[in-house]
Image: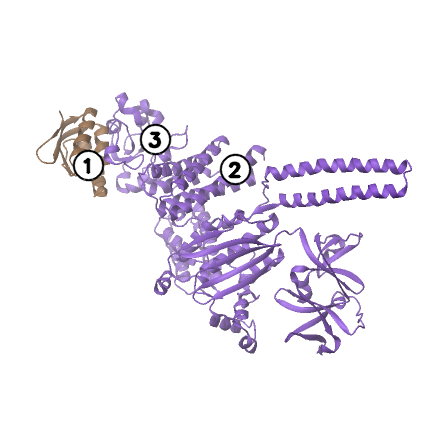
Amino acid sequence: LTVRLASGSVIELEGICPIEDAEPLLRHLLSIPHATVDWRACEQAHTAVIQILLAAGVPLRGPPAGAILRDHVAPLIATAAKRAE
Amino acid sequence: MSEFLEQFLLEARELVEQASDDLLALEEKPDDIVRLESAFRAFHTLKGAAGIVEFAAMGRALHAAEDVLSSVRAGAEPVTTDLIGACLTCLDQVVRWLDAIEVDGQPPADADRSADAVVGRFEAQGRAPRSARGSEGRRGPPSGWAGELLARHAAAGVRAAAAVCYTPDPGCFFRGEDPVARVAALPGLVVLELQPTRPWPALDALDPFACELTLLALVSGTVQEAERLLHPVRDQVDIQPVAVAGGADDAPGALTPAARALLEAQIELLGNRAPDEGSAGRLASAGRVATNVLRRSGRPNEAQELERVLTRSQAAEAPGVLVSALEEILNGTFGVASEEAEPAPLEGREAAARALRVDVERIDALVRLTGELTVAKNGIAHVAGLALGGTDAKTLGATLKQHYEVLDRLVGELQQAVLSVRVLPLGQVFHRFPRLVRDIGASLGKPARLVMDGEATEADKAIVDALFEPLLHTVRNAIDHGIEGPDERTARGKPQPATIHLRAAREGEHVVIEVADDGRGIDLARIRQVAAERQVASTETLAAMTDQEVSELIFTPGFSTADRVTRLSGRGVGMNAVVAAVERIGGRVALKSRPGEGTTVRFTLPFTVMLTRVMTVEAGGQVFGIPFDSVVETARVARERIMPVGAARAFVLRDRTLPLIDLAHALGGTDVRPSGPEADIVVAAAGGHQAGLEVERLGTRMDVMLKPVDGLLAGLPGIAGTTLLSDGRVLLVLDLQEILR
């Protein structure tokens, strides 16, 4: 799996995250109130996964591996996370 | 205009009213589910109506509002003043469109732009472009999205050649669609924005498989390339070319330094000065200059918008409204933003001749009466037949009398029925006020709420229609002069916001309307001072006046500045204009003020203008009618108690000296001095004056249908109207206001 619960309250995204990752990611986020998402190894993520990160406004540990994620998506999620605080 | 469109206008206006009422009530009680539902329904029905007449722009604007209300219903969003304000602005726009349709028979050409502004306002509050997608059938973002996107990314925008707005349909994930990947694949991605199509729900309510994003992107590749790559989803995408210079094609011309300096000078002109007599003039002139500057700078749209702001600013007598608009122009935020800064009061709308909505029962009554009248008519034919057949006079007379009685009853009922068709509830005028009070209060920095009472009280349509302006002035005066500023209220321990009471009640033949505020009351010392300054009354007269009399000085012409009185548009007029307007429809105005507790202005109006109660008098050998409203009393005064005062005469009635006017003489007849030892006098009051009218004989009271004078009589001074007496003579009814002047 490309999404998994690491130690403590860290959720890791890895490689190319397909739409199938969306539901487990959401489940993890719901079960861990103050989770952090580590996506340093993430190269690509499906829109559904990005959408969950945006909606949750979750803090991210980055930068992600993929260029699009790093240059375009990460700032948007960071803004959403700030708003969520 | 087609009947269909007329029906649309009629219903749309009612729905707008309904929605405004609900929104205002909701603002006061945010958890009022019933009101929320009702507002939502009104918006929804309005949107449907817009769809039926194929007015897509209106549908789009309303859809945006409906979206917001629906997320409030879902509990996803709280009711805020902002939100209510945005919805009210949307309704304002709808009313402007309706007005335009009423005039031209079709929506204005710039309807789409206005709709964009409304939708933009909802978006500006963090609500997403799902609302922008438009009403059913029309997908696609507002036309200004590309410009806005560029504005947000001015630096990166230089490299962009095309702007893309992609709103994937929510179910697209199931088709294996990955919108972000699709956009990321566009050549030369410069900027990417992901916006939720509606506020994000709580995480546990989020559907991970529904796409609720709008993707906005700037790419350096060509439009053609983007179109080719996005072809599979072309119905969900809007692609626009972007000028390399960076800036949307409708970007206004930049302001030259000279233009900026001129605008700044206007701000300075209006800046922090206490309102005085020159305020209105300064405001108008600054507005004119600024509008011209904008026109010269090639910004006609902004100039037009500024004119609207100016009107609003003048209506509220608040230069600050214009100042903040000018500041926005200078720092480039003017436009849609100014609309949201302050929703335009609807007061500019003149009450156009509208259709009358009549209860079906009242029409049925008329139909029934017509039937009975036809029967009565046939009865007369029968009597005529009897007469021709030689029936003896006595029997004939008795039959005729019988028929007369039937006719008399029927005509009486018919008159009542016709009058009742014209009767409307005062709520029709009142319902515009909650909104106005909110807006006027906000523009003056004095939050106020309106409490209404007796909206169901009915009055003749002519009265109801004529009431709006005087009431508006009175309400504005109450907020402007009556209510204290928030700080002062707090210091005095008064509740916040201030309350304006609008009450109506039927009192016999009259309708009484009161506008009461809970402000500081009338400042008598200040009134005395102003009255002395403006020479409304001499110092001695002022000193002798009772407090009540002094407070009523605000009704005197000349108490407000002359410049204000002559302005017809119904703005900034003094209270004497209110009195004039109310007296024109046969009413009176009274004032009650308690220092520190508030002021009440009371209008006493006739129930109907069609039936006027008059008292007949004889003067110069002719019968005249005097409006009963003006008659204070009748008196019989011994001749030796009438004293000559210069060329005129006066008499003392209960320790009060009143001028005595010989009515026959005043009307241009010869003096026929009646010889009796006592004079018959009608004490009358009108236009703030009281005087005795000497007449030859006092007549009776009667209700007459007053007809306005026309034809040859039209130029006659002192005549209010005519009516027919039972014997066929014409009765002239006097306009006492002119005679007593």
> In the displayed structure, does residue B114 sit left or right of residue B667?
left
* Front one among B301 and B103: B103
Dot 3 falls on a residue whose secondary structure is strand
Q: Is residue B514 above or below residue B637?
A: above
Three-letter amino acid code at the position of disc 1: Ala
Q: Is residue A62 above or below residue B330?
A: above
Report the disc number at residue B11: 2
Report the disc number at residue B239: 3
Q: Colour of chain B?
A: purple
In the rendered structure, the residue with mark 2 lies on which chain? B
In the rendered structure, the residue with mark 1 lies on which chain? A
Three-letter amino acid code at the position of disc 3: Ile
Q: Colour of chain A?
A: brown
* Front one among B622 and B526: B622
- Would residue B149 be visible to someone looking at this image? yes
* Front one among B632 and B402: B402
**x and y percent of residue B201 in the render?**
27, 36
Residue beneath the point at 75% across and 71% down: B679
